[in-house]
Amino acid sequence: EVELLESGGGLVQPGGSLRLSCAASGFTFSNNVMTWVRQAPGKGLEWVSSISDSGDSTFYTASVKGRFTISRDNSKSTLYLQMNSLRVDDTAVYYCVKGGLLTTGLDYWGQGTLVTVST
Amino acid sequence: QSVLTQPPSVSAAPGQKVTISCSGSSANIGNNYVSWYQQLPGTAPKLLIYENDKRPSGIPDRFSGSKSATSATLGITGLQTGDEADYYCGASDRSLSAGVFGGGTKLTVL
């Protein structure tokens, strides 16, 4: 059974940093594109970032480029999202997702971790 | 404003059929696969349709997907109250080098 368990969310002040982690199990992590999707309170889904199976290629939505960094450790089956210079509008539930929109879709989702950026 | 355009809401009676549209451009839907997601209240989204018209195992054939040019459509037949949810389309956008979603459509089963 595929499981994706996010951690690292919480309350942070504007300008601060957080690192999200996603522990994956139940599939061959190193063979799959991985993605972060976020959802602000009461709003729709927003694609944030994807990373290739090897980690060599990364992609970001424009609003987080230069502030967020996606990475992975295939030896630990873990996905990361380093978030710097956080803004109030980064407040959202962040989902770790197996797959990518370019190919077979986002086929398994974690339960999400809430990031709140506020004073 | 989302790159992909969906109607904010649709409604239909139990047992009826409903369609949800998703409009894009040649940069996204026109040259890439479309996928569809169902988000029940208070839960994480779930993949309903991938590669325009394929259903993952476990998704009933009441759900269908199609694509024509720069638009895609999700169809749901035999509506049930349990289908009340938000539905999102998604695709990759070659101009943005990024993924994009529609704004979401709230389905009400009257």
Image (cartoon, rainbow, N blue to C red):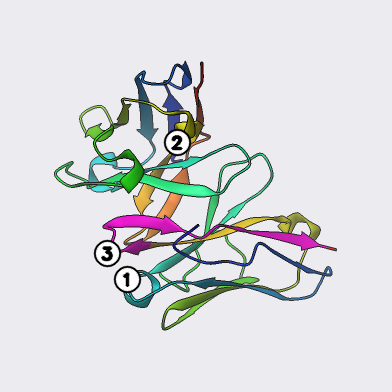
| Structural distance between the alpha carbons of marks 1 and 2 | 33 Å
- Residue A38 at x, y = what percent? 47, 40
| Structural distance between the alpha carbons of marks 2 and 3 | 32 Å
Give the residue at mark 2. Answer: A3
Q: Is residue B101 magenta?
A: yes
Contact check, label 2 and label 3, Cβ < 8 Å: no
In front of the other: B86 or B52: B86
Secondary structure found at label 3: loop
Q: Is residue A74 magenta?
A: no
Q: Read off the chain for label 1.
A: B
The crowding category of the residue bearing disc 3, from other C-alpha atoms within 10 Å (few below 14, some 14 to 19, many at least 20), is few
Give the residue at mark 1. Answer: B27
Secondary structure found at label 2: strand
Q: Read off the chain for label 2.
A: A
Q: Nearer the viewer, mark 2 or mark 3?
A: 3
Q: What's the amino acid at mark 1?
A: Ala
Q: Overall secondary structure of the magenta stretch?
A: strand
Instruction: Please report the bounds of the magenta region as a residue range.
Output: B92-109
Q: Read off the chain for label 3.
A: B
Q: What's the amino acid at mark 3?
A: Ser
Q: Is residue A4 above or below residue B97?
A: above
- Residue A78 at x, y = what percent? 30, 30
3 or 1: tag closer to the N-terminus: 1
Secondary structure found at label 1: loop
- Residue B61 at x, y = what percent? 61, 71
Q: Are marks 2 and 3 on the same chain?
A: no
Disc number placed over residue B95 in the picture, else none: 3
Q: Residue at x 44, y 41 (%)?
A: A2
On the question of residue B57 being in view, the answer is no
Q: What's the amino acid at mark 2?
A: Glu
